[in-house]
């Protein structure tokens, strides 16, 4: 199995991030210590955006720690690859076991700068994935969420204020319109 840095390098490209974000990802990968356990101030995270292509709805959560409406996701743990991370997070947050069976490619990369003293976390390097799902296959764990909903893209714009999430929703909406096979 590849190490995490190789795993991330294999899926990032200029087609899913602008040059500044891509350069920061590559610099951060070269620094090592990629997980929150290894570097509590700057680390990689995954977001996964459940999407129902038929209803054209996405699933978002009202996250307790951040107080924001966001896509589900989380921190990468040491000694995981991207497939393991996604399956762990999908199971922890949505109750769906082993949803991803093979390699999956992200659709977007973002950097989230965090200013929330006294927490040590200052930078998330976010890798975004879309996950085709439907409303009936989830068993949501509400320990991390105030609420969770399937919404249209228009409805999400009324709740979501996080810049990176808004950008990710716009990207996935365009894919849904222009090339749904990439979702």
Image: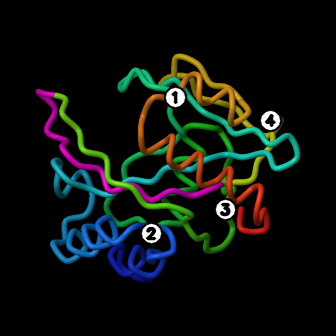
Q: Which residue is mark 2?
A: 81
Q: Give the distance between the C-alpha atoms of the residues marked 3 and 4, in whole angstroms.
A: 17 Å
Q: Where's residue 89, x and y in %?
A: 52, 47
Location of the C terminus (image quadrant) = bottom right
Secondary structure category for the residue under label 3? loop
Q: Which residue is mark 3?
A: 100
Pointer 3 or 2: first along the chain: 2
Do the residues bearing badges 3 and 4 touch, measured as CB atoms within 8 Å? Answer: no
Location of the N terminus (image quadrant) = bottom left
Pointer 3 or 4: first along the chain: 3
Secondary structure category for the residue under label 1? loop
In this rendering, the label closer to the viewer, 3 or 4: 4
Do the residues bearing badges 2 and 4 touch, measured as CB atoms within 8 Å? Answer: no
Q: Which mark is residue 160?
A: 1
Pointer 3 or 1: first along the chain: 3
Image point 59% across, 48% down: which residue?
A: 170
Image point 60% across, 33% down: which residue?
A: 60
User: Where on the picture, by quarter, is residue 59?
Assistant: top right
Q: Which residue is mark 4?
A: 135
Secondary structure category for the residue under label 4? helix
Q: Where's residue 142, x and y in %?
A: 56, 23
Residue 44 on the magenta segment:
no
Image point 70% across, 32% down: which residue?
A: 139
């Amino acid at each position: 199995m590849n190490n995490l840095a190789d795993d991330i390098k294999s899926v990032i490209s200029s087609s899913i991030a602008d040059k500044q974000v891509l350069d920061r990802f590559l610099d951060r990968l070269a620094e090592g210590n990629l997980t929150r356990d290894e570097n509590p101030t700057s680390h990689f995270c995954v977001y996964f955006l459940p999407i129902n292509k038929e209803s054209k709805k996405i699933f978002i959560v009202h996250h307790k720690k951040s107080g924001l409406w966001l896509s589900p996701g989380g921190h990468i743990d040491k000694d995981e690859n991207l497939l393991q991370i996604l399956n762990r997070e999908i199971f922890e947050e949505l109750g769906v076991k082993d949803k991803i069976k093979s390699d999956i490619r992200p659709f977007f990369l973002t950097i989230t700068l965090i200013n929330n003293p006294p927490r040590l976390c200052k930078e998330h390097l976010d890798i975004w994935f879309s996950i085709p799902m439907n409303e009936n296959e989830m068993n949501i764990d509400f320990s991390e969420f105030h609420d969770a909903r399937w919404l249209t893209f228009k409805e999400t714009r009324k709740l979501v204020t996080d810049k990176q999430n808004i950008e990710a929703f716009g990207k996935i909406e365009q894919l849904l319109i222009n090339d749904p096979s990439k979702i």
